[in-house]
Amino acid sequence: MLVTNDLMNGRAFENITAVVFDCDGVLIDSEEANRTYYNMLLEHVGLAPMTPQQAAYCHCHTCSESVAHIVPENLLDDVLAFQASFDYANLLPYLRRMDGLVEFLWWLRDTGHLLAVNTSRTNSMDMVLSAMDLEGYFFPVVTSAKVRRPKPHPEGLHQIMNKIGVHPRELVFIGDSIVDQHCAQEAGVRFWAYDNPSLEANLHITDYWTLRRCMQRANSRISA
């Protein structure tokens, strides 16, 4: 298992034109926000809070998939009505940007890398990017609302590659779940796992500070 460290071989970073990020668990820590939101839905219809297994599922699936997973069918209409009036801005205090992310994004952009997002979020992505001061870094931003088949299907990554004009061998997808892993594998792109050593990945990222140092060294050798 290849893990980011200051002594690693720089070959892992060769021929990278584009870096695509998942959102939750990669750009932002949203576990508390997700748990709060889905537990509010359950409370609204008189159900107990999520189990750890349900929370893990909801972390990496679309909102509609998550609701269908944790809410009995006979209560879905009540939950959907509650969702329609819910103000997602109430969850912003529970979100935080990953440490070292902005510095890493600045370096990637300055060195000419293309940046994009492929997320299972549906309609809240613009609000999240704005609240986390991450607007303007990514194109395109592909959400589950912009594809017919969300992750783990590779449609989102294919859409990104078509829009920015790169081949699978030039792209890296950074994710933190088995859904992200399968998406990358189906698309034929390199997969880097963020803070989840249980996944099958070309590289395991411990933190963005170390990853940036490793890529800086590799880039300086290539440029020399």
Image: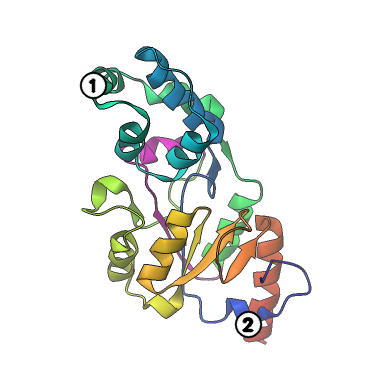
In this picture, is 196 found above or below 42?
below
Q: Secondary structure at mark 1?
A: helix
Q: Tell me which numbered mark, 1 or 2, is placed earlier along the sequence.
A: 2
Q: Residues within 10 Å of mark 1 (few under 14, many from 20)?
A: few
Report the front residue among 117 and 217. Answer: 117
Q: Which residues are magenta?
A: 111-132
Question: x and y percent of residue 65 in the render?
Answer: 32, 40
Q: Quadrant of residue 179?
A: bottom left
In this picture, is 148 found above or below 70?
below
Q: Which residue is mark 1?
A: 74
Quadrant location, the C terminus: bottom right
What residue lies at 24% left-to-right and 53% top-to-bottom? 147
Whether residue 208 appears in this view of the structure is: yes
What residue lies at 29% left-to-right and 21% top-to-bottom? 79
What residue lies at 60% left-to-right and 63% top-to-bottom? 107
Q: Secondary structure at mark 2?
A: helix
Whether residue 106 appears in this view of the structure is: no
Label 1 or label 2, whichever lies nearer to me, is: 1
Q: Which residue is mark 2?
A: 11
Q: Residues within 10 Å of mark 2 (few under 14, many from 20)?
A: few
Residue 124 falls inside the magenta stretch: yes
Q: Quadrant of residue 170?
A: bottom left
Give the amino acid type for the residue marked by disc 2 in the picture. Answer: Arg
Question: x and y percent of residue 69 in the render?
Answer: 35, 35
Residue 125 falls inside the magenta stretch: yes
Give the amino acid type for the residue marked by disc 1 in the picture. Answer: Asn
